[in-house]
């Protein structure tokens, strides 16, 4: 009576667990996806993603507030021009809250990452960071214009 071996026939191949195989496949997918992104975008993304997680959280929160403040005049103007009634006075605030929350969630996914994952650099990350920097510049311009109007002599 012969005993059958439970080992694979090719004894030179080391055993790889299912988890190790999944991690290797995920790393390969990340490398392939990163190779499709242009180099300067990839380097910018790596630079942002190398920051500590707490700093990335702070960046996302600040960018969400700045973006919300940047779109506020547009939403208020549209509301006052086309939809104003006394019953809907809260509508612009609700729309702004939704816009800010949406920008925050998008930033969290792109910059901070979900629990236990490191986000991959991608074009959307660069677009998000560009929108955040643009928001910062727009708010700075609005502040300068507001100060200059406020300090202008009245005649």
Image (cartoon, grey):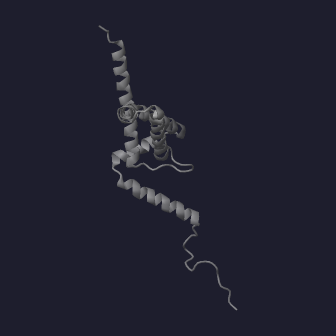
Spot the residue most to the right. Answer: 1
Residue 15 spot, x, y in % from top left: 58, 70
Q: Nearer the viewer, residue 107 or 39?
A: 107
| Residue drawn at the location 48% of the way across and 49% of the way down | 119
Residue 128 spot, x, y in % from top left: 40, 42
Q: Which quarter of the rendered picture does the N terminus lie within? A: bottom right
Whether residue 19 sits left or right of residue 66 in the image: it is: right
Tally of marks: 0
Spot the residue most to the left. Answer: 155
Q: Is residue 144 above or below residue 1?
A: above
Q: Nearer the viewer, residue 68 or 61?
A: 68
Q: Which quarter of the rendered picture does the C terminus lie within? A: top left
Residue 56 spot, x, y in % from top left: 49, 39
Q: Is residue 63 above or below residue 15?
A: above
| Residue drawn at the location 36% of the way across and 15% of the way down | 150
Q: Is residue 71 above or below residue 119?
A: above
The answer to which quarter of the image holds residue 141 is top left
Q: Nearer the viewer, residue 139 or 28?
A: 139
Residue 127 spot, x, y in % from top left: 37, 43
* Residue 6 appears anywhere in the view: yes
Spot the residue most to the bottom. Answer: 1
* Residue 62 appears anywhere in the view: no
| Residue drawn at the location 57% of the way across and 67% of the way down | 16
């Amino acid at each position: 009576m012969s005993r059958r071996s439970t080992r694979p026939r090719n004894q030179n191949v080391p055993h790889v667990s299912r988890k190790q195989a999944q991690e290797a496949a995920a790393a390969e997918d990340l490398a392939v996806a990163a190779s499709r992104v242009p180099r300067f975008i990839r380097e910018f993304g790596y630079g942002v993603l190398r920051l500590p997680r707490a700093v990335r959280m702070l960046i996302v929160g600040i960018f969400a507030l700045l973006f919300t403040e940047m779109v506020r005049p547009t939403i208020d103007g549209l509301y006052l021009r086309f939809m104003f009634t006394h019953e809907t006075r809260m509508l612009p605030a609700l729309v702004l809250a939704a816009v800010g929350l949406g920008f925050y969630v998008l930033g969290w996914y792109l910059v901070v990452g979900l629990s236990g994952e490191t986000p991959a650099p991608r074009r959307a990350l660069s677009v998000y960071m560009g929108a955040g920097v643009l928001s910062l510049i727009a708010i700075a311009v609005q502040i300068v214009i507001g100060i200059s109007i406020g300090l202008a002599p009245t005649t």
